[in-house]
Image: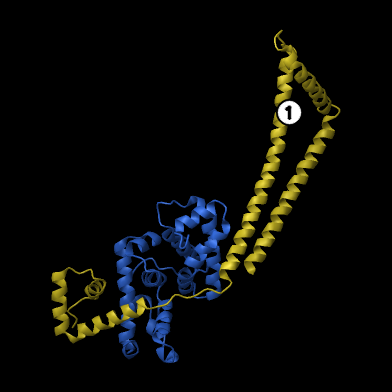
Amino acid sequence: MDNPTDLEIIESVKKGNISDFSLIIDRYKNRSFTLLKRLLKNPSEAEEVLQDCFLKAFNGLNTFRQDASFSTWFYRIVYNTALSKLSLKKRKIENEMTDISQRFDLKSSYDFNETEKKDFSEFLNELIEKLPENYATVINFYYINEMSCEEIAEVMGTSVSNVKVLLYRSRNMLKDIILKNNYKKELF
Amino acid sequence: MNKLSDEILNKLIDGELPLDEVKEVMKILNESSEDNDRYQTLLKLHGELKNLKEETTSDSFTYSVMKRIHAKYQVRRSDKFFIFSIGSIFVLLILGLIGYVVSSSVTSGQSSTGKLVVKSLVNFTQTFVEFSTTLFSKSALPVVGSIISAVMLGIAYFFYENLHHMKQKLSKLGSN
């Protein structure tokens, strides 16, 4: 098999070829790590949590229903583990969508001048990390993991329309910061 | 003043507006520089977000996870072996009991047919019964009970030690 599918790999692992699980790890580690790093804001902690997620997935392979996609199932593990970790750290998890001005004053929490020498994508990454957790999650799933709104809704346990609202709001939030702080020239 | 809402601009970017609405929105965008400015910023931002690159884990990440998985798999296997051993002991005990019951019934109600077939079985079971009777007699019962208790305590101790050892091994691997 040149490029086995997720299901083929899982079947092989279930048959006892445990080493094949490394293919799954290599396939999903970076995208999941990006999400965890954004949510937990700590690379080493993100990596530690990701290891636990892969262990959870390995232990739960027998409970994985093959009619669903493995990626959705695995990202749900990652997302839920991140949320548990965040709640353990007694951090505020956002479940409701309210106005930007009430929630986050991103302008005061970030100054582009401090990092003028960085390129814009790096700046954008740091801005996303400052977004509320569910906003950053949607941005990450949509743009990095290239998931559809339906898949994101399944992972986050919410409706497709809610995912779209979250996506629009996160984009608008970023756009507002760019416009209000005259970062347009860096963008264009 | 903005003529177009952020929602409409987002829908336009995602291609979720019907064609007739798109024409209308494009017309407004041509007329309103403010709306066009917002749209262009959103569009550019959308492009930048699409170009974002994923972060990478450390080089040894896959190796570390696989090491933990292999260790856990070993623990599972040794647990299975342990449970199988304990199970075998119980199965042997149950077989012994069944043998005792069978021998009792055979010795009490032998028919004329099949005497030869059961003769050897009778001899074997009679020996077993005699042994069991001696073993579980009133005088020997406290000694046998103590031995069984000691064996059970020994098994429990080794099982606990085994689990403790494996836990330590796993936490070491985890910290690596």
Residue A89, compared with residue B85, is above or below; it is below
Q: Which chain is yellow?
A: B
Residue B172, picture quadrant: bottom right
* Chain A pictured colour: blue
User: Where on the picture, by quarter, is residue A13?
Assistant: bottom right
Secondary structure of residue under mark 1: helix
Residue B39 visible to the viewer: yes
User: Quick one: which residue is furthest to the right in this view?
Assistant: B139
Q: Disc 1 is attached to a residue of which chain?
A: B
Q: Which residue is mark 1?
A: B96
| Residue sitting nearer the eye, A87 or B123 | B123
- Up the image or down, A121 lies above or below B154; here it is below
Of B80 and A173, the residue lying toward us? B80
Report which quarter residue A156 is drawn in.
Answer: bottom left
x then y, percent, for residue A18: 57, 57
Give the quarter of the figure containing the C terminus of chain A: bottom left
Tell me which residue sits at (34%, 88%) in the image.
A183
Residue A60 visible in the snapshot: no
Q: Relative to B70, is B36 on the left or the right? A: left
